[in-house]
Image (spheres, grey):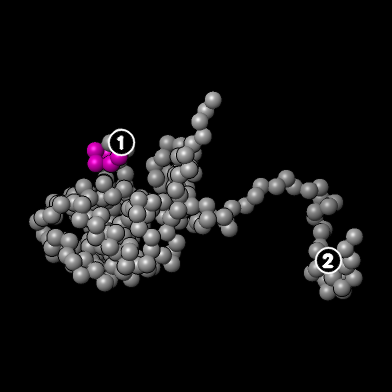
Amino acid sequence: ERLPEPDVDRTAYTPAEVVRLFDSIELEDLHMGKHPGPLYWRTALLFFLDSGERSGALRKIRWDHYDPETGIVIVPAAIRKGQNKGATYHLRPQTRDGLRMMRMLDTTGEFIFGSWHFHESNFFIRWRRIVKRAGLPVGQRHSFHKLRRTFATWIELHGGDATLALLHGERRTTEKSYLDERQLAHVRKVQQPPLPDVLDANYVSPFEDANAAAEFKPM
């Protein structure tokens, strides 16, 4: 007998919560390497929302993976989970401007968001501080992976295909682990079989007619 699958947390940030994250980032007073906290984290969050990339790969992306003229970043398979699928992302103007400012402040660094002079655990510690200051839940269920779920959910909210965007091999993987149904519920349409034309084509609700509504009597 097949054992039941464990319940997977699929919660994503809402747009209002993401605004709170950006507001919290503007209050960040610690540098990340040569970059002011607000610049670094604002650009990193924009990059997450542009790509849905995992934090592990994000911290290994090099400047030579990015073309500032086109706004395209090519992430090689070797630095991504599984190491068998590369990814290509087109960054929005806000993200590109952030990267441009970051490069102006660090013209010799190899990695865009990594390779600082302190342990990488500070990356997670400082993000947790930003989330907490935004008044949002912190903990394992609210890690960086929540941003990947946010990316997937927002793709679907706007009519896109999150399975394709996340480079998943199966739709089931996306639905099981990445889509926040709380946000998607209002756009889901229940598929119903059509009624015969005689019942459906000329139907007018009695409540659209004030007189008919007044005469309506429950059976």
Badge number at residue 82: 1
Q: Which residue is drawn at the image coordinates 18% and 51% (left, top)?
A: 120
State the extent of the magenta-drawn residues as a range.
Answer: 77-81
Q: Residue furthest top?
A: 1
Can the viewer see residue 69 in this picture? no
At label 2, which amino acid type do we have? Pro
Report how many numbered discs are placed on residues in the image. 2
Q: Main secondary structure of the magenta part?
A: helix
Which circle's residue, 1 or 2, is located before the other in the chain? Answer: 1
In the image, is residue 42 above or below residue 185?
below
Badge number at residue 206: 2
Q: Are marks 1 and 2 in contact (CB under 8 Å)?
A: no
Q: Which residue is drawn at the image coordinates 28% and 36% (left, top)?
A: 83
Residue 57: x and y in percent read 26, 46
Q: Nearer the viewer, residue 68 or 45?
A: 45
- Disc 1 versus disc 2: distance between alpha carbons? 59 Å
Can the viewer see residue 140 in this picture? yes
Crowdedness near tag 1: few (<14), some (14–19) or many (≥20) residues, C-alpha within 10 Å: few
Q: Nearer the viewer, residue 56 or 93?
A: 56
